[in-house]
């Protein structure tokens, strides 16, 4: 009987050890509750004016870019420029052989001179016939017939002039000149190549300034249009990030936009003009446009405080009794390390800053107030660079 009692007490002792509660101490439940209460960093929700810097993929285009093609057939006789060199408007770039066209021009000139001489003879003939008609030597009909022949000769003169002009134009086509100041691209043809009409000789790009195109969503377009004149002027200034991640040293100005949205992407193209005095930017270069947008009274919370469940965003709000409440909110924008809140949170409320994975709804905590550090304050004051602008 004594052995059975000892065995029963030993089993109860083992059970108490497994559940972690002392069977002899009636305050064990209070100790458990004391272990649950832990210190958690908490921040206060604030509304602040800030600037969002959105990034858009950009395509760089020269302000003028044309293809130079042959207008007449022939052999490429001379190349006066090299690839990548600067050229001036009217500068001679290529020369094709012009012997056939010079011969046609000489022929046209000869025909014109012949027609002019024939017209001169007809003029003398008309004057002679007028005298004879006045003396009734010949009839007036013979004079009229000579005048008609003279009109035909005048028409022949006009035809000869047109032929001469056309031959001169053909000769001019054998010389290809720069249409504007720019930079020469690759030269696919070499001296002696047989050139057909339409053969590409090179391209010329004027990159003293460049047009940068980028696509903007309909929502961002409406924000741009609805901004007042002062803000729009400020937003018109944009920055460019080059392909290597460096900042382009000159600011650009938004000049215009397309007239309709792309039905496939739901976006509209903007065009910004950038100066390019150092010729850093080339035709068809790429980069990223930084478009700034002022946001007034924006509620900004750190990404650490947010967790997602089934595509919904949640935070833990700390009540006056230091109990946490799981609450959903609607984000307006998401960017690197931060959210801008559209609805669901109010300034002055306290949020759990980190460690949300170990919390449950209704749990009590010991809040530890956490202030925004100096770096984050600078970020909010100077503006926030957005990685993924407006969420779908």
Image (cartoon, rainbow, N blue to C red):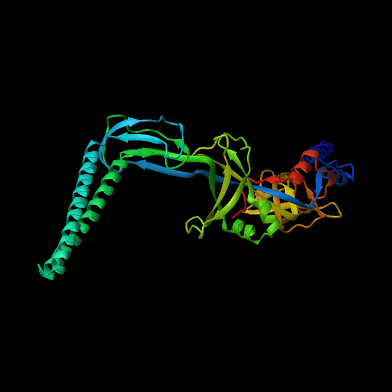
Picture quarter with the C terminus? bottom right
Q: How many marks?
A: 0
Q: Place residue 331 in its image quadrant.
A: bottom right
Q: Nearer the viewer, residue 80 or 49?
A: 80
Q: Is residue 196 left or right of residue 303?
A: left
Q: Place residue 72 in its image quadrant.
A: top left
In the displayed orientation, state which residue is furthest to the front: 135
Picture quarter with the N terminus? top right
Q: Nearer the viewer, residue 33 or 240?
A: 240
Q: Is residue 289 left or right of residue 329?
A: left
Q: Is residue 155 above or below residue 105?
A: below
The percent position of residue 168, horizontal first and vertical second, equals 29, 44
The percent position of residue 94, horizontal first and vertical second, equals 35, 34
Q: Is residue 165 above or below residue 184?
A: below
The percent position of residue 320, horizontal first and vertical second, equals 86, 55
The percent position of residue 108, horizontal first and vertical second, equals 22, 46
- The residue under the point 18% across, 49% down is 114
- The residue under the point 68% across, 49% down is 52
Q: Nearer the viewer, residue 91 or 46?
A: 91
Q: Is residue 235 left or right of residue 350?
A: left
Q: Is residue 118 above or below residue 28?
A: below
Q: Place residue 328 in its image quadrant.
A: bottom right
Q: Is residue 3 visible?
A: yes
- The residue under the point 70% across, 56% down is 230
Q: Is residue 27 left or right of residue 14?
A: right
Q: Is residue 331 visible?
A: no
């Amino acid at each position: 009987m004594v052995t059975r009692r000892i065995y029963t007490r030993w089993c109860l002792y083992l059970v108490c050890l497994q559940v972690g509660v002392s069977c002899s101490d009636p305050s064990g439940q209070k100790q458990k509750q004391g272990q649950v209460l832990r210190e958690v960093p908490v921040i206060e929700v604030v509304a602040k004016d800030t600037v969002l810097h959105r990034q858009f993929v950009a395509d760089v285009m020269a302000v003028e870019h044309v293809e130079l093609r042959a207008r007449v057939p022939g052999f490429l006789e001379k190349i006066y420029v090299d690839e990548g060199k600067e050229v001036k408007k009217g500068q001679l770039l290529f020369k094709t052989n012009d012997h056939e066209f010079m011969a046609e021009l000489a022929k046209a000139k000869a025909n014109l001179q012949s027609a002019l001489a024939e017209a001169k003879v007809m003029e003398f003939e008309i004057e002679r016939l007028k005298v004879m008609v006045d003396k009734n030597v010949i009839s007036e009909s013979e004079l009229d017939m000579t005048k008609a022949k003279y009109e035909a000769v005048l028409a022949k003169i006009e035809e000869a002039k047109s032929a001469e002009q056309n031959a001169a134009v053909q000769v001019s086509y054998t010389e290809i000149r720069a249409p504007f100041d720019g930079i020469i691209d690759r030269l696919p043809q070499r001296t002696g190549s047989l050139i057909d009409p339409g053969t590409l000789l090179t391209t010329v790009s004027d990159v003293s300034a460049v047009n940068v195109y980028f696509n903007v969503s309909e929502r961002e377009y409406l924000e741009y249009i609805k901004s007042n004149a002062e803000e729009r002027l400020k937003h018109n200034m944009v920055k460019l990030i080059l392909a290597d991640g460096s900042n382009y040293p000159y600011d650009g100005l938004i000049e215009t936009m397309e007239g309709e949205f792309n039905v496939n992407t739901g976006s509209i193209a903007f065009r910004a003009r950038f100066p390019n005095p150092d010729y850093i930017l080339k035709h068809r270069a790429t980069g990223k446009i930084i478009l700034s947008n002022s946001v007034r009274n924006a509620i900004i919370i750190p990404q650490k405080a947010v967790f997602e469940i089934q595509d919904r965003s949640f935070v833990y709000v700390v009540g006056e009794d230091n109990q946490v409440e799981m609450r959903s909110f609607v984000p307006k924008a998401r960017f690197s390390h931060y959210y801008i809140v559209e609805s669901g949170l109010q300034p002055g409320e306290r949020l759990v800053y980190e460690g949300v994975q170990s919390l449950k709804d209704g749990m009590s905590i010991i809040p530890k107030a956490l202030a925004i550090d100096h770096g984050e304050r600078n970020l909010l004051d100077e503006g926030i660079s957005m990685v993924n602008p407006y969420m779908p």
